[in-house]
Amino acid sequence: MSVVNVRPARPSDADRVLELVDALADYEKLPRPDADARARLRRDGFGPAPRFSLLVGERDRAIAGYALFFETYSSFLARPTLYLEDLFVHPDQRKCGLGLALFRAVAGEAVERQCGRMEWSVLTWNQLAIDFYERLGAARMEEWRTFRLTGDALAAVARG
């Protein structure tokens, strides 16, 4: 039986985490981060002023997954919200409980930080993830739509 462990990421984990970010991009059929984005991920995750929290999941002492999360704030609850940006276990390492262990560890962080809630997004085609979250009691928020501004559109709005 394999041993599963979740722990905070260390700077020495950065290369493996970036490999897993690439694997997630491949899985989601998105472009991999370019060299500049990879440098920012290193700085923002492992530098002197981290902008997000990162847990790694190990199977038999090898990193096979990660969870990246950060706090936002709910004005209605007057409490932080823990936002789970990425939860990923390499496809050839699934079905061993590592995803559940990572998710529970993030939920534990939310409780420890006295967050009013924990939120995340799931691609509509990722039925495996949807089923996983629903089995854990997560509620699908049908009445909310995600909007996004990026690149030139973001700059144009900022310029007015």
Image (cartoon, helix red, strand yellow):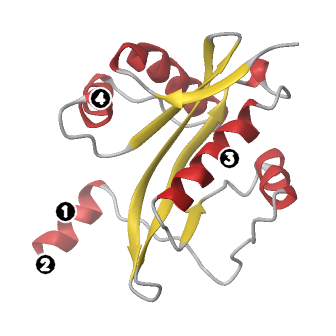
The answer to which of marks 4 and 2 sits earlier in the sequence is: 4
Residue 71 vs residue 56: left or right? left
Residue of label 3: 104
Residue placed most toward the observer, 122 or 7: 7
Residue found 71% across the figure and 37% down from its top: 101
Contact (Cβ within 8 Å) of mark 3 with mark 4: no
Residue found 43% across the figure and 17% down from its top: 13
The quarter of the displayed image where residue 136 is located: bottom right
Q: Residues within 10 Å of mark 3 (few under 14, many from 20)?
A: some
Between label 1 and label 3, give the one nearer the viewer.
3
Q: CA distance from mark 2 to mark 1?
A: 9 Å
Residue of label 1: 155
Contact (Cβ within 8 Å) of mark 1 with mark 3: no
Give amino acid for label 3.
Answer: Arg
Give amino acid for label 4.
Answer: Phe
Contact (Cβ within 8 Å) of mark 2 with mark 1: no
Q: CA distance from mark 3 to mark 4?
A: 23 Å
**In what quadrant of the picture does the C terminus appear?**
bottom left
Residue of label 4: 46
The answer to which of marks 1 and 3 sits earlier in the sequence is: 3
Q: CA distance from mark 2 to mark 3?
A: 43 Å
Q: Secondary structure at mark 3?
A: helix
The quarter of the displayed image where residue 58 is located: top right
